[in-house]
Image: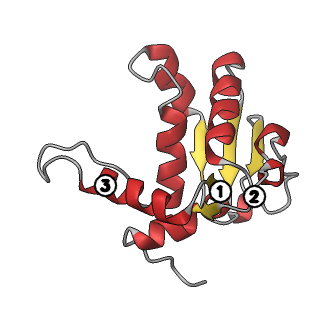
Amino acid sequence: MSEEVEVIDGEGLILGRLASEVAKHLLKEKEKKIAIVNAEQVVISGSKEAIFREYKTRKNRGSKEQGPFFPTMPDRIVKRTVRGMLPYKRARGREALSRLRVYLGVPDEYEEVERKKVENANAERLSLAKYVTLGEVSEKLGWAPKQR
């Protein structure tokens, strides 16, 4: 690959902390591209019932024709969360968001590449074991993962 791509493994990382770190890097380093793999294993902290309820109401909010439209696939939820932490209505934010790629699982092109972990976002720092993965949330919203 010709460009410098930083690959982040999302397994066991907290969604909000991961998104804020990625947004900071995208805004600070103008040439760097970031790829997040294993998006379905990113973690949301809190009780399952509360998380499912919140995402269910988000999905059903607004009319079918006008929006707002909220994603149900894990990779799109991660990208939407990062977008919320960028000034995406300005050229600087749109350009930063265009350098982000989010994948379900690990694509073949990143199989051999060293994957980084965001230390601030590690789910092991949660004091309680109350969390749910984005894959579980997406399945509750109607997403059906493809079997390999």
Depicted 107 relative to depicted 4: above or below: below
Instruction: Point out which mark residue 57 bears.
Output: 3
The picture quadrant where one finds residue 23 is top right
Which residue matches tag 2?
12
- The amino acid at mark 3 is Thr
Sequence order check, earlier mark of 2 and 3? 2
The label shown at residue 43 is 1
Q: Are marks 1 and 3 in contact (CB under 8 Å)?
A: no
Residue 127 versus residue 90: which sits nearer the camera? 127
Give the Cα distance between marks 2 and 1: 6 Å
- Labels 2 and 1 touching (C-beta < 8 A): yes
Percent of width and height locating residue 143: 41, 71
Q: Tell me the CA gap for discs 1 and 3.
A: 19 Å
Residue under the image location 72 percent in, 28 percent down = 32
Compared with residue 77, is residue 23 higher up or lower down, i.e. above or below?
above
Circle 3 crowding by C-alpha within 10 Å: few under 14, some 14–19, many from 20: few
- Is residue 61 something one can see in this rendering? yes
- Please report the residue visible at 35 percent of the width from the left and 60 percent of the height from the top: 56
